[in-house]
């Protein structure tokens, strides 16, 4: 089958179909190449399988067409045999919307096949696509020498003054802000002038009995405009995204009171050097731009002149404890969860932050991480966003513990509880986190919605966001130590793993003490629930899951037990899921063999040409085998 991304296809009347390229000369079977521009696949063939019958061949063709999502064009029987007819000449398409009409008629002379007449809508290749001129700012082509000359002519002495970091940043961005204001005003004037022109043109046509349709085409109003918001307004969507991180009960932290209780040996920011700025800028490769429109490449080229200026701005920010207001703004880009969204929840946002804000965050991140690592303050069971830790290390740890339990003499069962915190990153309380840069966070959807201020959560897309959440959840282990169940301190009777906001708690017990182990994890779960409430996080009980792992023999005997589940809150239980019942592999002799249709469908979907595919055989060869000798595939893979 052709790829949907292909621009040209060649259709042969003997059933062959090739993607792109030129038609080779002297092909067997009388192939008539037809070059068209389409995103639809067409298959034409004499299959010698009567689709009007219930034969095995016909059943196979129907099954294969169904697996490949092909639709049969209904042009009727094509092969008269005596007083009856058969349908062996077929045309399949993966998009029946391109078929305008279809029928067949008796062919002249002595042909035993009817003449099929199908009208299909194709775009011709004769008329080249018209490319309209447009302008854009080519940041990659900026001449660094001219940029540095321009920057050197500016006065940067104000950076060494005593002004606040917001005042200093405003002076740096003053010309840029003036340009942006003028550009926005110009764009608005052009929009108003265009609307006035269209209004006058249409009313003039109506008054003078001119062809209104030709006027509409002239002012380019007729082509359907693609509505990327699908009827929703930017303000509606922006409010939906921001409302998650807005709380009327959130209050500013009393930093003076907290600092008065802090010890003398606490963390302090160091002065930012030029070397710190260069390393932080070089850390990023993305060229995404926020509202100021300056990508990483321009900042990198300007460093020989802007080094002292940026280092001074960053040092002022850290020494004064003020995160610049303009850098707290995030522009949201929408991604659709569904092809046709019907609710605001069918969108998800991607936040674009100021690049210089990310540079400052990277410098802060490096300094805090160095302090925390040297003092070993991070929970050793936290695998998220840490060097030499990943989802793989967390998965290996818990998998190995389950395996050791199964292989032990006691054949231990592992009771696993997987917690789910709803929108954890968006619900963090800044007053509890004590990070000044989170207060007054703003977000805007595109350029035509109102700014909304959020007071919860960590900024999406920020460097510090995941790291701050790790600090926020770092004291969860204290809840385990302080909470005492019937067996004493619980930390010695269970284990847990963290990956950012994903928490897994598990205990290994023998089958005779299963209920005792469940009670133990229930006590732990209640401790987690209490900790979440104290820290303004919502534990989603519906998505929290519990599973029991064990040997095949052990798990099969659990049916005899009356298990309510794990009590995560008072009289609220998480039942044990039956999706996973054992930690054993399926024996090879129990794996069902592939059907011929399954193998053909998989083989035809392979990408690539001469590159080695399954069994080292090129994909293009496998496709030929699938169409001509499918029985060989069964011998090869079953």
Image: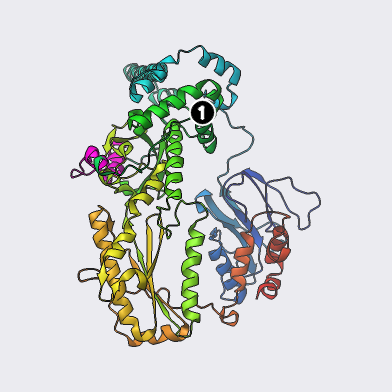
Residue drawn 50% across the image and 31% down it: 277
In x, y percent, where is residue 429? Answer: 27, 46
In x, y percent, where is residue 397? Answer: 48, 66
In the rendered structure, which segment of residues is drawn in magenta? 234-259
Q: Quadrant of the C terminus?
A: bottom right
Determine which quarter of the picture holds residue 228: top left
In x, y percent, where is residue 384? Answer: 44, 54
Q: Quadrant of the N terminus?
A: bottom right
Residue drawn 34% across the image and 44% down it: 458
Of the pair 86 and 420, the residue shown nearer to us: 420
Q: Is residue 157 magenta?
A: no
Question: In the visual, does 77 lie left or right of 194?
Answer: right
Question: In the visual, does 317 lie left or right of 125?
Answer: left
- Residue on which disc 1 sits: 274
In x, y percent, where is residue 519? Answer: 28, 76
Q: Residues within 10 Å of mark 1 (few under 14, many from 20)?
A: some
**Res. 233 in view:** no
Residue drawn 33% across the image and 65% down it: 544
Question: In the visual, does 381 lie left or right of 13?
Answer: left
């Amino acid at each position: 089958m052709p790829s949907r991304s292909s621009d040209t296809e060649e259709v042969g009347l003997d059933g062959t179909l090739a993607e792109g390229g030129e038609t080779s000369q002297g092909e067997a079977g009388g192939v008539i190449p037809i070059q068209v521009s389409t995103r639809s696949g067409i298959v034409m063939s004499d299959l010698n399988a009567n689709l009007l019958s219930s034969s095995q061949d016909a059943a196979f063709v129907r099954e294969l067409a169904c697996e490949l999502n092909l639709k049969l064009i209904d042009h009727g029987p094509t092969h008269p045999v005596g007083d009856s007819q058969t349908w062996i000449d077929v045309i399949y398409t993966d998009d029946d919307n391109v078929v305008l009409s279809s029928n067949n008629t008796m062919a002249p002379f002595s042909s035993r096949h009817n003449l099929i007449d199908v009208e299909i809508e194709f775009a011709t290749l004769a008329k080249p696509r018209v490319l309209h001129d447009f302008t854009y700012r080519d940041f990659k082509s900026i001449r660094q020498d001219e940029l540095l000359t321009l920057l050197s002519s500016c006065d940067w002495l104000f950076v060494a003054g005593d002004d606040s970091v917001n005042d200093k940043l405003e002076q740096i961005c003053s010309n840029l802000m003036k340009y942006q204001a003028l550009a926005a005003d110009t764009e608005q004037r052009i929009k108003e002038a265009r609307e006035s022109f269209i209004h006058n043109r249409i009313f003039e046509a109506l008054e003078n009995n001119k062809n209104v349709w030709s006027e509409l085409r002239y002012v380019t109003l007729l082509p359907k405009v693609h509505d990327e918001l699908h009827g929703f307004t930017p303000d509606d969507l922006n409010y939906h995204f921001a409302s998650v991180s807005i709380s009327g009960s959130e209050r500013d932290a009393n930093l003076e009171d907290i600092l008065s209780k802090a010890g003398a040996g606490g963390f302090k920011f160091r002065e930012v050097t030029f070397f710190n700025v260069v390393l932080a800028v070089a850390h990023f490769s993305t060229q995404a731009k926020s509202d100021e429109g300056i990508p990483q490449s321009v900042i990198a080229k300007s460093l020989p002149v802007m080094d002292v200026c940026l280092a001074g701005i960053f040092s002022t920010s850290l020494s004064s404890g003020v995160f610049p207001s303009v850098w707290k703004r995030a522009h949201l880009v929408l991604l659709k969860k569904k092809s046709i969204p019907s609710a605001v929840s069918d969108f998800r946002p991607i936040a674009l932050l100021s690049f210089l804000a990310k540079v400052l965050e990277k410098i802060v991140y490096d300094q805090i991480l160095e302090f925390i690592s040297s003092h070993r303050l991070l929970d050793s069971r936290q695998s998220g966003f840490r060097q030499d830790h990943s989802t793989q290390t967390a998965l290996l740890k818990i998998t190995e513990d389950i395996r050791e339990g199964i292989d032990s003499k006691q054949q231990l069962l592992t009771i696993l509880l997987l917690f789910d915190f709803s929108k954890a990153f968006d619900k963090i309380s800044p007053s509890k986190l004590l990070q000044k840069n989170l207060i007054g966070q703003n977000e805007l959807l595109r350029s035509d919605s109102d700014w909304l201020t959020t007071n919860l959560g960590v900024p999406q897309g920020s460097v510090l966001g995941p790291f701050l959440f790790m600090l926020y959840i770092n004291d969860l282990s204290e809840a385990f130590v302080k909470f005492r169940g019937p067996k004493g301190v619980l930390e010695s009777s269970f284990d847990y793993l963290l990956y950012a906001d994903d928490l897994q708690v598990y205990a290994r017990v023998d089958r005779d003490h299963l209920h005792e182990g469940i009670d133990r994890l229930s006590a732990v779960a209640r401790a987690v629930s209490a900790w979440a409430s104290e820290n303004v996080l919502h534990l989603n009980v519906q998505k929290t899951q519990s599973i029991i792992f064990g040997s095949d023999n052990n798990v099969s005997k659990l049916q005899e037990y009356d298990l309510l589940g794990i009590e995560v809150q008072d009289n609220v239980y998480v039942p044990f899921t039956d999706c996973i019942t054992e930690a054993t592999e399926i024996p090879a002799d129990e794996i069902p063999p592939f059907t011929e249709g399954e193998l053909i469908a998989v083989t035809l979907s392979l990408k690539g040409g001469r590159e080695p595919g399954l069994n080292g055989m090129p994909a293009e060869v496998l496709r030929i085998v699938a169409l001509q000798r499918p029985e060989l595939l069964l011998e090869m893979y079953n």
